[in-house]
Image (tube, rainbow, N blue to C red):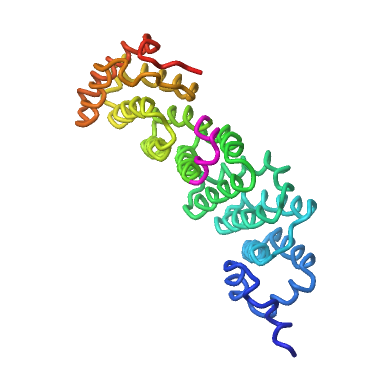
Amino acid sequence: MDDRSIVGPPPIKLHSHQIRARRSEPHSAISPLAENPDSIMEEALELARAKDTKERMAGVERLHQLLEASRKNLSSSEVTSLVDVCLDLLKDNNFRVSQGALLALASAAVLSGDHLKLHFNAVVPAIVERLGDGKQPVRDASRRLLLTLMEISSPTLIVERAGSYAWTHKSWRVREEFARTVTSAIGLFASTELPLQRAILPPILQMLNDSNPGVRDGAISCIEQNRGTLDEFVLLILKVVILISKNPQLSHRHFGLKTAQKRCLRLASNIRFQITSTAANPRLNFTLHRHFDGHSLNLAEMLLEEMNMSYESCCTFGIGFI
């Protein structure tokens, strides 16, 4: 028998990840896929529905392998069947099953065209829930899947849809992992997706007040990642709020934290602004730079007071909202 009937097309025609997937499979499992991929997919979906946990694990693993090795776009009906099965698997008590479902959806996303977008209303909230899973591999797979959905559709759209569930989710782990997801999204898409920072900054600022330190750290990391697209004036304000957020003992002064947070949110909601003169208020500029060099808590508290007094007359400093 010709060797090519066993191993399939020459490796040079495959992507690297497809080559790895095929090499990891027995030869006997590869040839049926080439002959009748539809029936093989149906068999994997059926196995993934099994009552036995080991059979479900085998089914979801096989499903992921098939999708990784496939070069054929999925039809609308195939996507619907896949989503229906995976949504059930995401609720599975076995973390390897739910992790496998997330990996399968990520592989399917690049083969689905616009078909998967029709299921975003069901898929996105289910992924957000898995951000709170007790197992890190499941949380990692959830974050990667959200980033994949951003890549095939719109980063801003996915952040807004997922954020409507994640920003204020009852689970601190969901909030923390979503902040990490958004941090990655900024690094990947902010330079080409200008509306992204406008969608992210207000809820991220609210996270600085979160009761969980991990969530607050995630918000700070997100702001730091976003600094390349923010104006210097906003960054200076954010640095003050971050200093206060890291030191809750300062928050007893309502005049400081609450006012700063409220006004940062106002700035964030009007992120498109211009500074007509950076030297319009030399004393304020001097104070900002001098106090941030030392990161002194007492000086930060004084700075909040000064910013509070000067904010109401910010138009005299040359800041005009568009």
Q: Position of residue 67 (x, y in %)?
A: 67, 62
- Which residue is most to the bottom? 1
Viewer-side residue, 234 vs 262: 234
Q: Check the image and report above or below for 261 versus 131.
A: above
Q: Check the image and report above or below for 236 versus 196.
A: above
The reply, left or right, for residue 66 in relation to residue 223 is right
Give the quadrant of the N terminus: bottom right
Extent of the magenta region: 188-198
Q: Position of residue 116 (x, y in %)?
A: 71, 47
Q: Check the image and report above or below for 89 versus 163.
A: below
Task: Confirm whether the magenta stretch covers residue 276.
Answer: no
Viewer-side residue, 211 vs 49: 211
Viewer-side residue, 155 vs 103: 155
The reply, left or right, for residue 269 in relation to residue 225 is right
Q: Please name the residue shown 61% across and 47% down the image.
A: 149
Q: Position of residue 251 (x, y in %)?
A: 30, 22
Number of marks in the image? 0
Q: Please name the residue shown 48% across and 37% down the image.
A: 175
Task: Confirm whether the magenta stretch covers residue 193.
Answer: yes
